Amino acid sequence: MPINRLSQLEVTNAKVGMHSDGGGLYLQVTRTQAGQLNRSWLFRYSVGGRERQMGLGALTEVKLADARQKAAQCRQQRLDGIDPIEARSNARRTAEASGVTFRRAFEIFFDVKSESLSNPKHAKQWRSTLDTYVFPSIGDRAVADIEAREILDLLTPIWFAKPETARRVLQRMETVFKSAILRGYRQRVSPCVGVKEELGTRHQKVLNYRALPYQRIHTFLTGLRISNSQPATSLAFE
């Protein structure tokens, strides 16, 4: 099908209707209730036998040459097996996601999560943990761009010094990243994956209580049975 069929004069003077420029590009002219003419560009194509129409902008904003350039890009996408409307939607979502910080991703997630926390203390601990250990480092970073090395840098100072706290920090960050991925704010795998294995799982040396020498067991049991301990306590020790 020939392309670039419309002249600038024809575009300017186009009446109500659909005017083909070829190659799927159309100038659509409609009339408002007030009698004014609206002129806008459409790219028409089909996917799986179903016709789709993609708006390319109003004539007042997109001139003829620009519309033809956009239509050419759409035709190339169709040759590559890409749906132009889906591609544009994905690009918009990616652009929106780039503006979502980790702090904002947490707030969105926690608005829902807090409803399931019956204990106000737990909700306070969630926020306090992230305020102290996470937000100063990555709170204002785009959640889509945060890398594993940033998580390692954040956790390394407390991993062995405060093992239980570090475990909770990692767990809570992981939950926020999973939420961000589900909501489309992040396309890559969570940067928390593999962090635990990298830092090591042995946080502290295990300390065992000294065993009672077996020679003293008889004396211990005799004293236990005549003690004032609760029966259940005595039986448990025995």
Image: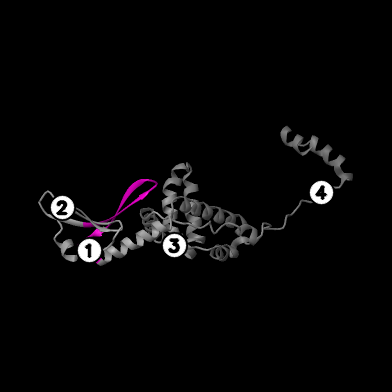
Q: Give how far apart the Cα atoms at labels 3 and 1 are.
A: 32 Å
Residue beneath disc 4: 211
Query: Residue under circle 2?
Result: 16
- The amino acid marked with disc number 3 is Ala
Q: Position of residue 189 (x, y in %)?
A: 53, 56
**Residue type, label 4:** Ala
Q: Circle 1 sits in a helix, a strand or a loop, which is it?
A: loop
Residue 61 numbered mark, or none: 1
**Disc 3, disc 2: CB below 8 Å?**
no
Q: The disc labelled 2 sits on which kind of residue?
A: Val
Residue 230: which quarter of the image?
top right
Q: Position of residue 199 (x, y in %)?
A: 64, 61
Give the residues drawn in magenta, as a range.
Answer: 40-64
Q: Quadrant of the C terminus?
A: top right
Q: For marks 3 and 2, give the CA distance.
A: 46 Å
The secondary structure type at the circle numbered 2 is: loop
Principal secondary structure, stretch drawn in magenta? strand
Q: Position of residue 18 (x, y in %)?
A: 21, 53
Task: Give the residue at x 14% y 50%.
Answer: 32
What secondary structure is found at the residue carrying circle 4?
loop
Residue mark closest to the camera, 3 vs 2: 2
Label 2, residues with CA under 10 Å away: few <14, some 14-19, many ≥20 = some
| Label located before the other in sequence (3 or 2) | 2
Which circle, 2 or 1, is nearer the viewer?
2
- The type of residue carrying mark 1 is Glu
